[in-house]
Amino acid sequence: MESDAANDRHSVGEGSGGVSLLRPPRIFCLTMLSIVLWALIFYFISTMKGDMASLLLKPSAFSLQSFRFGRDRCVGRYIYMYDLPPRFNADLARECGKLAPGVDMCKHTANDGFGPPLPPGDSLPEKGAYDTDQYMLELIYHARMRRYECLTADPSIAAAVYVPFYAGFDAALNLWRSNLSARDALARDMAEWLVRRPEWRAMGGRDHFLVAGRGTWDFVRGEGGGWGSAFMTYPAVRNTTVLTIEASPWLGNDFGVPFPSHFHPSSDADVLRWQDRMRRLERRWLWGFAGGSRPDSKRTVRAQIIEQCGNSSSCTMFASATGFHNSPDGIMGLLESAEFCVEPCGDSYTRKSTFDAILAGCIPVFFHPISAYTQYTWHLPRDYRSYSVFIPQDDVAKRNASIEETLRKIPPAKVARMREEVILLIPRVMYRDPAANGVVLKDAFDVAVDAVIDRVAKRRRAAAEGREYQDSVDGQLSWKYDLLDHGQTDISPHEFDPYI
C-alpha cells in the first residue's frame, strides 16, 4: 500500500499536461508578482511629494485607489474640475501684491492659501498652525479639490462640476475701478466662457459650483452702479451653487461656508488631541471679546460691548491684552481663556472670529441671526441653542440687556453641554492640510462638497421629472428655505422674522 501511494505521488504530474504539486502553478506565480508590483507602485506614489506625485496622481475617471474589491466608493461622489485658462485663477493669485494697498497679501497665498507657518506658541498647536487670511478660501478649496479622491476626467459621470475661478481675487483687484465695464471684464468673460462649454449645456450650469472667497455683497452690484462686481447677477451664474464666506439671506443660490481659521491639521489624531486640550483648559474669564470698536458703524453693538466688558471683572478683551490685535497666538489665547465669546456684527454680519472661537472651544454669543444661524446651515446645528447664545442686538443697543447677567443665568450643567457641543463642531469648521491621508473626520470642505452634491442630485432628479427643483427663492423669504427641517416644504412664521 505504501509503495503504491508513493508511486501515485510520483506519478502525478508526469507526462504531458500534468500539474505538479511540488511547484506552484504558473498563474499563481504571475498573480503574486502582480500583487508585489502594484504594492511597490502604491508605496512609491504614497511616499512622493511635489510635482512628480501630482503628475502621477492626475485625476482620472477610474481610480484604483477608490475602486476596491469590486465596489466603486466614488459612485455618486465624482467631481469634474475645469482646467481653466490661468487668467481666471493662477494669474490673479500672482497679482497678490495689489490685493490690499499697504499690506503684503502675497505671504498669505503661500502653502495653498494657508499662509506662512506659525512658530509654536502658548495657544496654538505645535504643528499645523498658519497665519491664514480670511480671504484665501478660493486657493484653499482649489488645492483640496486637486487632491479630492473622487476627481474624474469624465464629466458624464460627475455628480457635480467645480469651477476654480478666483472670483474674490478678481473682485478685490477691481473694486475701486470707476469704469464698471472694466471692473466686470473678467467676471463677464468667465460667464461667457462657461456657457460655451458642453459640460455647462448638459444642465444649464445647475450641476456647477464655485467658491467666492468674499461675501456675496461684493458680487451683486446692480446695473445702476455701486459697490462690487456684478458676477453673481449674471443668469449663467445664477444657475450655479456659490459658496461664500457670507451669504445673503435674500438670494437662492449662495451658501455660507466657514472662514478659514489658523489650525490646519494633517491627521485625525491632530484634531482629537486639540479637542482634548480644549476640554481640559482652565477658563479664567466668564466672557471675552476679540475685536475693535468700529466707531463709524451704526449697525453694530461693539461700543456697548466694550463698555460692558470694561466695567466687568469677569470679561477680557484687547484693551486688557495690549499688542495681541494682529497676533494669531494672542487672539487664540484670549478666546481660549473665556467661557463665552461675543461675536457682534462688524464690517458685515459675519466674523472670522466666530470660527476662531469654536476652534478655541469657546461658546459663541451672537446678536443677529444673520451672523451665523441663517449662514452656515450646512456646518452648524439647526438648534442654535445647543451651541450658542442669542441676545438681540437691539436689546443691547438700547441698554436693555446686560450681557453678563444673561450669561450668568445659564446653569453650569448646560454651559458644560454647550461647550462640549462646540468642541464636537471643531472638525466641521476647520480646513485640514490637503496632503492629509487616512482621515475619517469630515472637515469644512468635506461637509460643503457633500451638501453641494446632494443639492445637485435633487436638481437632477427634478429635471428628469420635467420640473425645476426649488430649495430656495430670491427675495425676503429665501433664508427660511435654508432653515427648513428635513422633509419640510412649506415656510411659516419664524422667530427670526423681526430681525431679517
Image: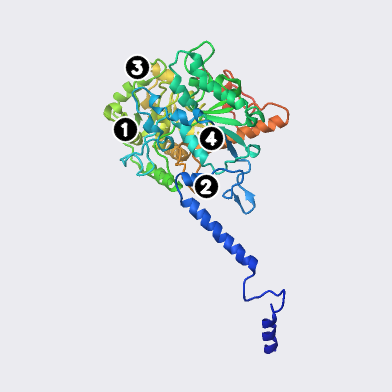
Quadrant containing the N terminus is bottom right
Q: Quadrant of residue 420?
A: top left
Q: Position of residue 197 (x, y in %)?
A: 62, 29
Which of marks 3 and 2 precedes in the sequence?
A: 2
Alpha-carbon span between mark 2 and mark 3? 54 Å
Q: Position of residue 118 (x, y in %)?
A: 34, 39
As helix, strand or loop, the secondary structure at mark 4 comes to helix
Q: Nearer the viewer, mark 2 or mark 3?
A: 2
Which of marks 1 and 3 precedes in the sequence?
A: 3
Which of marks 1 and 4 precedes in the sequence?
A: 1
As helix, strand or loop, the secondary structure at mark 3 comes to loop
> What mark, if any, has residue 448 been given in the picture?
4
Residue type beneath disc 1 = Ser
Residue, far top: 224
Q: For mark 1, what is the residue?
A: 327
Alpha-carbon span between mark 2 and mark 1? 39 Å
Q: Residue at x 51, y 18 (%)?
A: 184
As helix, strand or loop, the secondary structure at mark 2 comes to helix
Which of marks 2 and 4 precedes in the sequence?
A: 2
Residue type beneath disc 3 = Pro
> What mark, if any, has residue 295 been given in the picture?
3
Alpha-carbon span between mark 4 and mark 1? 29 Å
> What mark, if any, has residue 56 been given in the picture?
2
Q: Residues within 10 Å of mark 2 (few under 14, many from 20)?
A: few
